[in-house]
Image: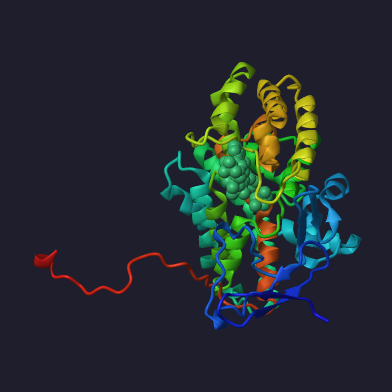
């Protein structure tokens, strides 16, 4: 017998609503029939709303659990690599050896961008924020692939997925090179995904570039830790854009735009800015006080999460990676890391943060690693977008390959009821 919820509203017959159960996690009350009964639900920020059914990623915020197709992020971070997690997110299963080799080969052979796309960069100022450039050039990719924009065609969807995952690092590195006035580096098919990214970022045509394997492994893990995170704001944006039938490049560009905000993917850049502003441990108390002050808009960047009311499991892995990178680079006593750890210690002992279950999230430590690797702060959210691309694409594909309707929320209207127009001499 299917479970149901009964909505009792004064003066009218009760409304029975089906309760749906997933494989794990909270059941959901299906309210899609409420409109026919003359009601909308009201849930600003979608705190209590499941927007869709999905089998890609599961988060248990109270327990601090993150599963990609059932596999814990801790095990994937320890034993897998970014492209293998891309395959897992897109296909639902880990690849066997030949599937993995074929996927890696396909990705590495789609890393180049059309030569005319290189000209797009010249329209930007050299100091343009790289996220502004990425929104532009990723959206523009659709202008080069008219051969594969039929979203109803599974092969077109697959080719677009490969192109986007493969080209994001190339475009990201081009943003950086453009800001320096250095030549763009063509991708190399003999390097791994992360090695190739570091080569395109820090290599130059005048001398050979040797990739540090510890740094490459850390970069790969940083991409992986950002790969997907259920129905977060940017993924929900991609799904909403995709529900109109927009092409995948336009949808991913919309996800990049949504990610840019400091409450979301822009937090990693904001963490470093905050640490610079705090300066040293003696001022941590002052900033924790500001973060608690309701009259002060300041928030502790890299802390808190809509879903995690426990330590973000990604932050734990990120901190471990941070220690590895700083040790490899001889930066063990990095002042910003020490400041971040002091900030974390004080915040986690403070009642305000404890009561609200505010813990470090994925953005708290990532910036310290990225900075140590030599990636400029304004490129941090571009790193997040590059890592998140397989997740965005997997959700877009899951929706488009299933049954879906255009997303069209309603509202609680609090504006003027009907009133007649007043000619200007009567106002
Ligand atoms: C990401 O959704 C995802 O999965 C996102 C993400 C992903 O992988 O896609 O995990 C990536 O975006 C991580 C979050 C990065 N953002 C930040 O680090 C920015 C700082 N954090 C906050 O702005 C905030 O915690 C959010 C935006 C992350 C969550 O906001 P919510 O869920 O709307 O929580 P809220 O604003 O309602 O806060 C609840 C309470 C409030 O206090 P009260 O009104 O109850 O007294 O906690 C307070 C808030 O003022 N609070 C903070 C705080 N975060 C929440 N107070 C100080 N500093 C903070 N960071």
Image quadrant of ligand 1?
top right
Q: Which quarter of the picture shows residue 84?
A: bottom right
Residue lying farthest left? 425
Q: How far across and how far down the image is residue 179, in percent?
A: 50, 39
Q: Residue at x 30, y 74 (%)?
A: 418
For residue 374, side relative to residue 420 (left or right): right
Q: Nearer the viewer, residue 368 or 291?
A: 291
Residue lying farthest top? 282
Q: How far across and how far down the image is residue 268, in percent?
A: 61, 39
Q: Nearer the viewer, residue 208 or 254?
A: 254
Quadrant containing the C terminus is bottom left
Q: Which quarter of the picture shows residue 207?
A: top right
Q: How far across and how far down the image is residue 108, in percent?
A: 73, 56
Q: Is residue 196 above or below residue 49?
A: above
Q: Residue at x 68, y 45 (%)?
A: 197
Residue 173 can be seen in this image: no
Residue 275 can be seen in this image: yes
Q: Is residue 178 above or below residue 5?
A: above
Q: Residue at x 75, y 49 (%)?
A: 224
Q: Is residue 11 above or below residue 348?
A: below
Q: Residue at x 40, y 64 (%)?
A: 414
Q: Nearer the viewer, residue 352 or 77?
A: 352
Q: Which quarter of the picture shows residue 57?
A: bottom right
């Amino acid at each position: 017998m299917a479970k149901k919820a009964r909505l009792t509203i004064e003066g009218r017959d009760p409304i029975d609503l089906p309760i749906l159960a997933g494989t794990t996690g909270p059941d959901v009350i299906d309210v899609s029939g409420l409109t026919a009964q003359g009601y909308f639900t009201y849930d600003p920020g979608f705190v209590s709303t499941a927007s869709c059914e999905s089998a890609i990623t599961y988060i248990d915020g109270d327990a601090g659990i993150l599963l990609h197709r059932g596999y814990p992020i801790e095990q994937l971070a320890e034993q897998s690599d970014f492209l293998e997690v891309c395959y897992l997110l897109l296909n639902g299963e880990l690849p066997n050896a030949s599937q993995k080799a074929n996927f890696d080969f396909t990705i590495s052979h789609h890393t180049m961008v059309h030569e005319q796309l290189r000209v797009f960069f010249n329209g930007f100022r050299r100091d343009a924020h790289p996220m502004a450039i990425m929104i532009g050039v990723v959206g523009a990719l659709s202008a080069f692939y008219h051969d594969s924009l039929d979203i109803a065609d599974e092969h077109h969807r697959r080719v677009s997925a490969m192109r986007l995952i493969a080209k994001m690092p190339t475009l990201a590195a081009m943003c950086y090179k453009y800001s320096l006035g250095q030549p763009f580096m063509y991708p190399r098919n003999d390097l791994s995904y992360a090695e190739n990214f570091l080569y395109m970022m820090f290599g130059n045509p005048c001398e050979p570039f040797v990739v540090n394997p510890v740094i490459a492994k850390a970069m790969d893990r940083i991409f992986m830790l950002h790969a997907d995170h259920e129905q977060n704001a940017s993924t929900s944006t991609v799904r909403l854009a995709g529900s109109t039938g927009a092409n995948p490049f336009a949808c991913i560009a919309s996800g990049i735009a949504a990610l840019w905000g400091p409450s979301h993917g822009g937090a990693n850049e904001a963490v470093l800015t905050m640490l610079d502003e705090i300066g040293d441990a003696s001022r941590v108390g002052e900033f924790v006080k500001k973060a608690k002050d309701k009259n002060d808009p300041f928030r502790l960047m890299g802390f808190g999460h809509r879903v995690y009311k426990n330590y973000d499991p990604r932050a734990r892995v990120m901190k471990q990676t941070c220690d590895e990178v700083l040790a490899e680079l001889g930066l063990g006593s990095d002042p910003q890391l020490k400041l971040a750890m002091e900030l974390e210690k004080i915040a986690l002992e403070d009642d305000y943060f404890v009561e609200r279950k505010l813990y470090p999230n994925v953005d708290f430590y990532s910036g310290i690693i990225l900075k140590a690797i030599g990636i400029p702060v304004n490129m941090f959210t571009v790193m997040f977008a590059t890592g998140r691309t397989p997740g965005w694409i997997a959700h877009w594909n899951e929706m488009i390959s299933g049954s879906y309707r255009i997303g069209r929320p309603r509202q609680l209207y609090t504006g003027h009821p009907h009133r007649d127009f007043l000619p200007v001499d009567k106002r």
